[in-house]
Each structure stands twice: as structure tokens, then as C-alpha cells.
Amino acid sequence: MSLATPAAKIGLRLSLSRDDLLMRVGLVALVGVLLLIVGLPLWALLAKGFEDRDGNFIGLANYISYFSTPALFNSALNSFHVAAVCTAIVVPVAFLYAYALTRAVLPAKWLFQGISLIPIFAPSLLPGLALVYLFGNQGFFKGLIGGSIYGFDGIVIAQVFYCLPHATMILVTALATADARLYEAADVLGASKIRVFFTVTLPGAKYGLISAALVVFTLVITDFGIAKVIGGNFNVLATDVYKQVIGQQNFSMGAVVGMVLLAPAALAFLVDHLVQRKQVALLTARAVPLIPKPKFGRDLFFTLFCTVVAVGILAILGMAAWGSLIKYWPYNLSLTLANYEFANFDSNGWSSYWNSLKMALGAAVFGTVLMFVGAWLNEKTKGFGVVRSAIQLLAFLPMAVPGIVLGLGYIFFFNAPNNPLNFLYATMGILVINTVAHFYTVGHLTATTALKQIDPEFESVSASLKVPIWKTFGRVTVPICLPAILDIAIYLFVNAMTTVSSVIFLYAPDTKLASVAAVNIEETGATAAAAALCLVIVATSASVKALHLLADRYLLGRLQAWRRR
């Protein structure tokens, strides 16, 4: 029972400073924005699943129809099958690759690390296009595989390429936080290398392994591009959503398939969240960093292993690059740049690429401001627990929502006739908003992590000197967090350039993006031109990332100089 009287509560409100009131107003505004770009579109998607084609409420009829239709239900089983197999392949390979990068002495380690990141810069359909050139009906090595590359086998191979860097980055982080004292103690006690691996190394990396497995499973089960290019007659949930909405104009059934697709992704996110809560710090203040020492046999094995994986990645990228330069595959293998004249294959020509640049820059600017300011408001506001909890929920929600599901929700919400924001539909603005919403969680977590590293003493001193909190934000917080802010911007830019699934339903003829244009060009049979457009995206994303690394190094030097003052 609260002892606070109404008068006391009024006094508490009056005791709030102007800065506190501004922060709380900002939080309420942030909740409104997150509801508009995440919460309400998903609610509209959920509601649509209970309506017929005419918008009449029919209860669970659509869900009953879905689960009683063998072809549709088999797509769900296919998705789970592919995701499970890919996870079983990717996680061990990524673990060995990450182990080589962190626990072995490799020649040109930076090169192996850079090659492993290449798939991140490409739209997901690129490995599918490369596999068509390698093992398709007219492929270079079509006789090397027993069956057709179109279907289960092709999806698995392409997904391994696409998901490997995501798992590798997680496992490199997990293996890098090792205490050398544990290994020294094991050596003193005479433990064998195998026993040390199973009693020290694996337990230390178990949370990273679980996270990597869940990330790979979610990426595979929600991906659209690879299944669209090389899936053939092997239907999965992501392509079913596309067929129901674009092919049959059955939005209600598309919403049902979207909700079915959302369930495993949300479950994987929940499991990962519960696992992360149980994780404890493995690297204490007294820990000794583990620095690998040269060992010929081990280093040779891992160098060969990393070389094989790197060659596989480069082979897929190289095949796509070569295919984009071939005049007429496989009958005329002379080289040409005609496939880069995109106007011959798509009415938008190069304008789709420039649209992608505009959208990526818009998402990077708008998203970075929203994510960093939002994380700052949520982290630095005192009290106001209910609103802050709501923000945390809405900020984490996009991580569990597949892009194609979020895009479908945007159709139902923003295209509703009675929605005053209807004017945004089919504009560049909605593409920017959708991209920011899709990738909001990672940017929010990055900003929150950076803000937690700032000593609260800065705000305390500023308050004691009567300095407005927004001045402290501009003069202290932003300069200190500039590397993290830049990380968020580059993350948004690269993902905006490569995303397909979240924007496939939202573009208009004059706002078509390069990744979507590549899908449309591939549908017409112009595989070389689609590969060419994907490679332009790869080159752009990789160049921006290279500039980011140079800027990061410069900012780190400036920050160290600022701290020494």
C-alpha cells in the first residue's frame, strides 16, 4: 500500500527539473515513433489473418485452411528442414574458422578475416546466381552433382555461404574472451589437449555457439532471395508469402503465412535472450589475455582449413563476377560490359542503383539519429520505468521479425485508406522507415553499449554546474560515442544496400531499389545482368566499409588525444 498522498505526488512532479521533463517528453515521443514503425504494422498483420479477401472477420478460418492445405503446410516443414541442415553445417565450420583466427598463428590473418566478411556485402540472391553458373542446367560443373541444383541442395549451399560470416563474427567474439591462466593450469595438471578443449574451450564458448546457431537458423528460415533464385519447385515459407501476395493477391492468406513465419523467428530470439541472461563474465579484471604461440602442426592445419573456406567464398563471388562479364552463357564466353547496361534489362536502368544509394543514406542518417538519441533517452532518463520498459520491448521486437513479415505489415498499416500516414505508401520515405525499423535492434544495442561505458560523473558534474543536459549530450556524449555512432551508420547503410525481403512489397516504379531490380531481372532470365547488379552492390558496400575502417582509425586517435587533455 502506497503512503504517498495526491499532494505528495503533485510535489514530486513539480520537483522534476526541466531536463527531466524534456527527457520524459522525448521518451513518450520515442514510444510513439516505435509504435508507428514497428508495433502497429505488426498488429495490422495479425488482424489481417482473421479477415477474408473483402475484409470481413472470419476468425480462425484462414489458419484452418492453411494447416489443412498440404502444399502450404509442407512449405513450413521444408523451411525447418533447410534451416536445421544449414545450422548443422555452418556452426561447426564457423567455429573452426573462428578458432583459427583467435587460437592459431596464421599467415595473413587479416586477409582470411576480410574474406570471411564478403558475403555480408552482397544481397542474398548473389550466391544463388553463382550456383546457377556453376551447377545449373547450363552450369560449368553440372555433371559433378547427382541431382539438380534447383531445390534443397542449392538452397543449402547458398545459405552456407550467406550465413557463414554472421556465425563467424559471433564465435570470434566468444573465443576472444579467454583467460590464459585456465590453459596454463590445465598444462600444469597434465590435461590432454582434447580434454582441455572439451572442459575449457567449449564451455567458455557455449553461449556464443548457441547464439550463432539461433542466428543461422533464423537467417535461413526467413531469407527470401536465395529460395527465390534457386529454390525451383522446393517451396519455403518466405517464397509462399511472396506467391500469396504478389501471385494470387491473397493478402489474408499471406498474413497467415507471415505469422507462421514469425513464430520460429520469435522463438529463436526468445531462446537466445534467455541464454544471454544466464551468461556470466568470463574475462575478469585479473584475467590474462590468451595470445596463441606458434605451433607448426596446428597452424598448418588451420591455415589449410581457412584457405579451403576462403577459396570457396572467393569461388562463388568470382563465378558471379565472371558470369556478369560473359556475352551469352554458355555459348559465347567472350567478355563484355553489356550486362552492366541495366537499361537493356530493366526499365529503371541505373536509377534503381541510385535509389538504393539514396535510401541507404537516408536510412543511415535518420536511423542513426533515432537509434542513438533514443538509446540515450532510455539510458539516461531517471525513473519512468513503465515507458522505458515499453521502449526496450519495441526496440528488441524487430530482431524477432523477418523482413518479409514486417514489409507485409507495412502494406496493411500504411496502405489503409483511413490511415493519415497513407501518403507515405510507395514513396522513398516508407522504404527508409521500413529499413530503419527492420534493423533497429542492433543499432539500439550498439548505442546502449557505448553509452553504458560513459562514466555517469559527466552528467553529475554538468547538473551541478547548471549545464543543460542537451549541451552535455552535444559536447561530451556524442564526441565520446562517435565511433559507435559511425558503426551504426555503416551497419544501416550496408544492410539497406543489400536488403531484399523487407522492401519487396513496398517499392513503386520510380523507387525500385537495386536489390529488388536484381530479383526482377533474374525472373526474366537475364542472370548475367542480375549478377552484375549484385556485384555493383557488393563493390559499393565494401568500399563504404573500407572508408569506415579508415575513419574509425582516425577517430580512435582523436579520441585518445581528447582523453589525454
Image (tube, rainbow, N blue to C red):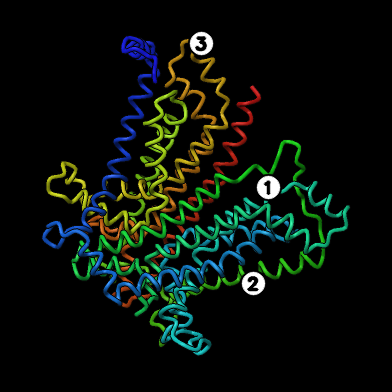
Nearest to the eye among marks 2 and 3: give it: 3
Real-space Cα distance between discs 2 and 1? Answer: 26 Å
Question: What x and y, as percent, mark residue 355?
Answer: 31, 54
Three-letter residue code for mark 1: Thr
- Residue 57: x %, y % from top left: 14, 56
Task: Name which residue type carries label 2.
Answer: Val
Which residue is more in the foreground, 5 or 196? 5
Residue 559 image position (x, y, % from top left): 59, 31
User: In this figure, which residue is indicated by the disc labeled 2?
Assistant: 308
Of residue 496 and residue 419, the one placed in the foreground of this image is 419
Task: State how far apart marks 2 and 3 are (Cα).
Answer: 60 Å
Q: Residues within 10 Å of mark 1 (few under 14, many from 20)?
A: some
Query: Tag on residue 177?
Result: 1
Q: Quick one: label 3, few (<14), some, or many (20+) residues within 10 Å?
A: few
Q: In this view, does 241 lie to the left or right of 98?
A: left
Q: Dividing the image into 4 quarters, which one contains the C terminus?
A: top right
Disc 3 designates what residue? 464
Q: Position of residue 194 (x, y in %)?
A: 77, 64
Does 456 appear above or below 399?
above
Whole-Å distance between the Cαs marked 3 and 1?
39 Å
Sequence order check: which comes first, mark 2 or mark 3? 2
Q: What residue type is labelled 3?
A: Ser
**Image point 38% across, 49% down: which residue?**
398
Q: Which residue is drawn at 41% across and 80% down?
A: 150
* Mark 3 element type: helix
Q: Between 262 and 156, which is closer to the camera in this rendering?
A: 262
